[in-house]
Image (cartoon, rainbow, N blue to C red):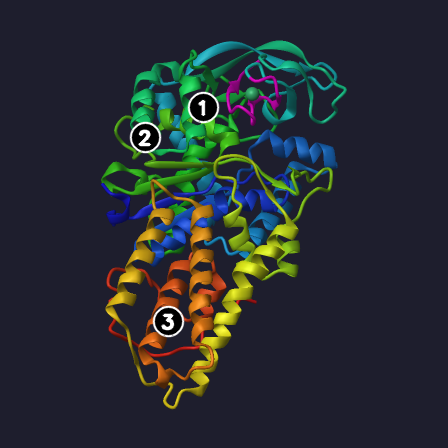
Amino acid sequence: MNPSQDERRVLILGPNPTPNGGMHLGHIAGPYLAGDIYARYQRARGRDVIFTTGTDDSQTYVQATAAREGITPEELCVRSTGLIRDALAAIGISVDGFGPFDDTYQATVLKFFSELHAAGVFRLKKVRLPFLERTGEFVVEGLIEGECPVCLATSRGGLCETCCHPNNYDELVDAHSTIDQTEKPTVREAEILVFPLEEYRERLTAFHEARIPSWRPHLGQMIREVLARPLPDIPITYPLGWGMAAPFPETPGQVLNAWLELMPAGMYTTSYAAAQLGTRTEPGQLWQREEDLRVVHFLGFDNAFFFCLPHIALLMAHGEKYVLPEWIINNEFYELESAKFSTSKGHVVSVQDLLREVPRDVARLYLALTAPEHGRTTFSRVGLDKIAEERLAGPWNRLAATLGKAVANARDAQAPLPVSATARGRVTAMLARFDTTYEMPGYSLSRSAETVLVHIGRLAGRADALAGQRVEAAPEAWGDLFFEVRALLAAASPILIDLAEAAGLTTAPLAAGGFDLTEITPFAPPEVR
Ligand SMILES: [Zn+2]
């Protein structure tokens, strides 16, 4: 089906942020702003949307950061979850529900894995895992760092964030602890439960090959690379001291692999968000095929392996019960002044810090314009100021002042002005253009933001040409301009959220027929500030 005509309910998922710190601009410019603008566009078209994410407490990254900071993992989770929720709210990420790590979360995860365990999907396997003799603990995932066996970049255990290939067990080269980098692990055998991904090769290949042509090339490349190699057995349990207890008799005392938890966690946060919107459902119910949701995942390339392969195979392992994602949209890394964001090195700008200095709409538009959709891009404070002055707040506020003055000087400000067929044609063309940038398969934050700027520039020029003329002197030219400005406010509303609210737009301003007008009442547009 043409996505632009698809009126089904849309389920949008952002990756669950790991609560081992707050959220900086690099996180926001990735999947969260992408999910938010997509969700807002779908709502503006009048569609039913559930947009959700939630916290991801079980990761070893939490344990490693807490150990480095000398606090408990629980304390770190509480503090970080607060910071993450504040950052999402501050920049206007419109999640319908941010699922907490509560009893229902854990019950949903346990049910999902227990059903697969009962169906005989997992295998018991003896593996060699890195082990710290000094502490007597296994160190995997975020607790260990070494050289990626595939691309040779520095990588954590389990998954390389550079090439996105998995590395399991003792495959990292020249590994060391992430808590104390001088500590080198030995290797010990352990019996764990694994998920034999190879058994899903045929179905995974069919699923991805049908979709890869309309996905971003880097994601398709990674999936084809991984599928060209033997698919690994993915750990379901680990002998670790942090994480959710695995309820299986074969692996007493072990915990679930936090990465795989994220699949049922998505079902949990879906029902949590639906409840916030007024629909109470059992976790997992909305993922059943008969619900026919259009599932759209936004995620960073660095963790795409889990979302694209093991997670989808876990859904397949449940038989025909669950819907599979229709779209997976990845992003790359976002940098700060051409260097990687680094909390530990203090090379970071928090969302809240930026918003103390610039209007939220300016921040959102600039992050969208420079979003790392196909490769690394960078945040530049000078660049932001230049865009704001020359292409966004500068021309828009001039346009708003011109229109405001025309309204103030009108003999009867309530008298409607005519809208010509030519203006209706231009608005139809403009909205169609926006649709190609806001909708699949061409969804692009960068092109959406650029399209907003193009039309601000175009209409500011038209306003300049009419400045000083009374509306009564040129009612058709003014009517057309007010009409096109109204349409631009609606089309920009997924990005410029405060402007749209100040303009008092209706709840679904881009619903069919919304701009089928022959006259318009003049209005004073709000300013970007
Ligand atoms: Zn790698």
Q: Quadrant of the C terminus?
A: bottom right
What type of secondary structure mainly makes up the magenta span?
loop
Read off the residue under disc 2: 211
Residue 7 image point, x, y percent? 25, 50
Looking at this rendering, what residue extends furthest in the front direction? 465
Indicate the amino acid at tag 1.
Answer: Met
Of the residues under marks 3 and 1, which one precedes in the sequence?
1
Q: Position of residue 177 (x, y in %)?
A: 69, 22
**Which quadrant, please, contains the N terminus?**
top left
Q: Is residue 96 visible?
A: no
Residue 216 sits inside the magenta stretch: no
| Badge 3 or badge 2: first in the primary sequence | 2
Location of residue 3 with respect to 256 vertically, above or below: below
| Residue 468 screen position, x and y as percent | 47, 81
Above or below — where is 147 with respect to 71?
A: above
Highlighted magenta segment, given as a residue range = 151-169
Disc number lying in front (3 or 2): 3
Q: Residues within 10 Å of mark 2 (few under 14, many from 20)?
A: few
Task: Tell me: is circle 2 under 8 Å from ligand 1.
Answer: no
Task: Please give the residue where the numbered disc 1 appears in the rendered image.
Answer: 222
Spatial distance from mark 3 to mark 2, Cα to Cα?
Answer: 41 Å
- Precedes in sequence: disc 1 or disc 2: 2
Image-quadrant location for residue 354? bottom right
Q: Which residue is mark 3?
A: 481
Looking at the image, residue 177 sits to the left or right of residue 467; the answer is right
Of the residues shown, which amino acid type is indicated by label 2?
Answer: Arg
